Amino acid sequence: MSARVFRQAVAAEWGKVWSVRSTWWCLAGGLALMVLSAVAVGAGAATDAVREGGGPIVASEPAVSATIFAQFALVALAMLVVTAEYASGSIRATLQALPSRGMMLAAKAVVVAVVLAVAGVVSALAATLAVGMVLSLEEFGGMVTMPAGEIAQDVLKAGMYFAMAGVLTLGAGLALRSAAGTLTVVFMLLLGVPLLAMMTGSSVAVELSLRMPLFAGLAFMGSTENLTGGPMPYPAAEGLGWLVLWTCSAVIVGFVVLRRRDA
Amino acid sequence: MTCVISLENLSKRYGERTAVHDLTLELAAGKVTGFLGPNGAGKSTTMRLILGLDRPSAGRALVGGLPYRSLVNPLRTVGALLDARAVHPGRSGHAHLSALARANGLPGGRVDAVLERVGMGAAARRRAGALSLGMSQRLGIAAALLGDPPVLMFDEPVNGLDPDGVRWVRGLMRALAAEGRTVFVSSHLMSEMQLTADHLVVIGKGRLLVDAPLREVLERSSLTAVVVRSPHAGELAGRLRASGVAVERTAEHELVATGVSAERVGDLAFEAGIRVHELRAREASLEQAYQELTEGSVEYGASERVRV
């Protein structure tokens, strides 16, 4: 019974995502940002490598770094799945058709996770190929390698990171309901707070911010460096753990608000 | 069809403000029940409580004996139009309905069927944000009809409709009730309600004022009266008063008697041998009856504004 209700709910949410233009804008924006920032990061790294006599760059590494910027376009897609419904009032139509709040949240989470995972994989792959092409130009001294196994792993992990960042945003959106509020909170949580904390230079603040979602994600995606220039102080698996913890917390907060507050 | 709505001591408070207070009532199937009350009386809140969108502070609202939140595929049980503009402005009406149909396991053919029934046609392919209020209203009604439900609720369905649209909605409500469905409609347009409703529920400041058939509400009004013209109005007034009829002399040759039938007034005049030139029953309009009922329960009435 409830399995059928869930399938119907997912089908409904799936249809809704693809019937608004904003979805396509977010996907196109995410893809463009991934490719452009990966090429920029890769070009910078290759130039450094040429000057300092370093080894070639794995083409997917700049793509992983590019997620820092590109994530906001895809996170906006996840946000709109909730906040656009509250803004228009159509959330009431959604809840009339599907009064089980948990089921509605689960359906939206599945759709967001799938869309963002696929979008993440595709745009990370496109970014990797672009980096490979640009860096093999004469100007960068061919400082690039494309090991298939490593690239496959990075690209899949980028998809997983986007999926989780999307579901985290979904939880925040359900808790806050407004687009402005959600975007602000998610931006601060992903980027603002950790950067500010690092600026303080306090080692406790740095340690804590490295366990916030973005850096946990970068650790999970195998980034050997963080924005402070030092190595990640914990293994990739732990990064995944922190990321899952953040995502689940956001979903729980969103669910509690969804259950308790009037629609 | 046993799928009726029942409210049991339903209350809703928003902080200090009580929107709905201890509402107990049952809506019958096969009838159009008009839901009346001044702005802010709690009509929309009551509908949201029935639909499980808001949580009651006390009491409960049941649909066919179950709380809305526990219904499976609820659009097959209750169809509701709350706010016609509550559609993603970038999504087409057709896509909006398709999503609702999928959510409740309804065949895709239902979408086209209800769009046909409300006469939306090609407009259903346009972005909802580009629709006129009238078209949005039709889309909202289509959404309510989607699951072919035995219970229908409409909050101000004729808002923004042209006279043809208003007549169409009236016909639709009557037809839905005639099919045995429970139809619950709120409206500000009293003249419209008088033509549409069989039964009336009136609330003021969240409290139930009236739960009675339309006929009864009209008959109970002090403005429902018998008007008599007679060259001997004074004498007739005396006779009527002696028989316990409330009479008012409204002009030299005119009387208005309340709480009595035209037949009885005619008989009394005949017995007294008094000539009568005109004898007619005057029926209060729903607007007048309603005004009598809600006096003193207008949330933001003029008297209050003066005090501020």
Image (cartoon, rainbow, N blue to C red):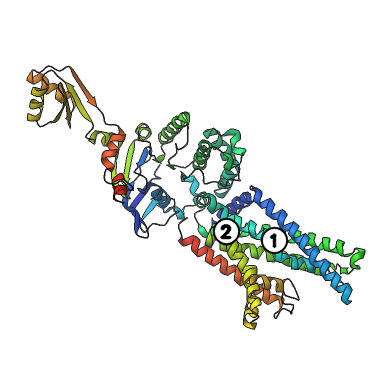
| Above or below B131: residue A213 | below
Query: A223 or A114, which lies in front?
Result: A223
Mark 1 residue type: Ala
Q: Earlier in the sequence, mark 1 or mark 2?
A: 1
Of residue A109 and residue B272, the one placed in the foreground of this image is B272
Pick the residue in front: B243 or B249. Answer: B249
- Would residue A212 be found to the left or right of residue A142 on screen? left
Q: What label sits on residue B261 in the rendered view?
A: none
**The N terminus of chain A, quarter of image:** bottom right
**Label 2: chain letter:** A
Q: Is mark 1 on a helix, strand or loop?
A: helix
Give the x, y percent position of residue B231: 13, 17
Picture coordinates of residue A87, whole percent (x, y): 54, 52
Is B110 on the left-hand or right-hand side of B290?
Answer: right
Query: Label 2 belongs to which residue?
Result: A180
Q: Which residue is drawn at 69% across and 61% down?
A: A117
Residue drawn at 71 percent across, 71 percent down: A218
Asked whether the residues under marks 1 and 2 belong to the same chain, the reply is yes
Q: In this view, does B227 lie to the left or right of A51?
A: left
Q: How many labels does the image show?
A: 2
Disc 1, disc 2: CB below 8 Å? no
Q: Quickly name the residue at label 1.
A: A117
To which chain does the residue with label 1 belong? A
User: Would you identify the image quadrant in which residue A36 lies?
Assistant: bottom right
Mark 1 nearby-residue class (10 Å; few <14, some 14–19, many ≥20) = many
Question: How many other residues sit within 10 Å of disc 2, few (<14), some (14-19) or many (≥20)?
Answer: few
Would you place residue A122 above or below residue B157 in this image? below
> Looking at the image, which residue is at 38% across and 39% down?
B188
Residue A207 at x, y = what percent? 65, 80
- Coordinates of residue A4 in the picture (x, y in percent): 57, 54
Taking the image as shown, residue B127 lies to the left or right of residue B56, namely right
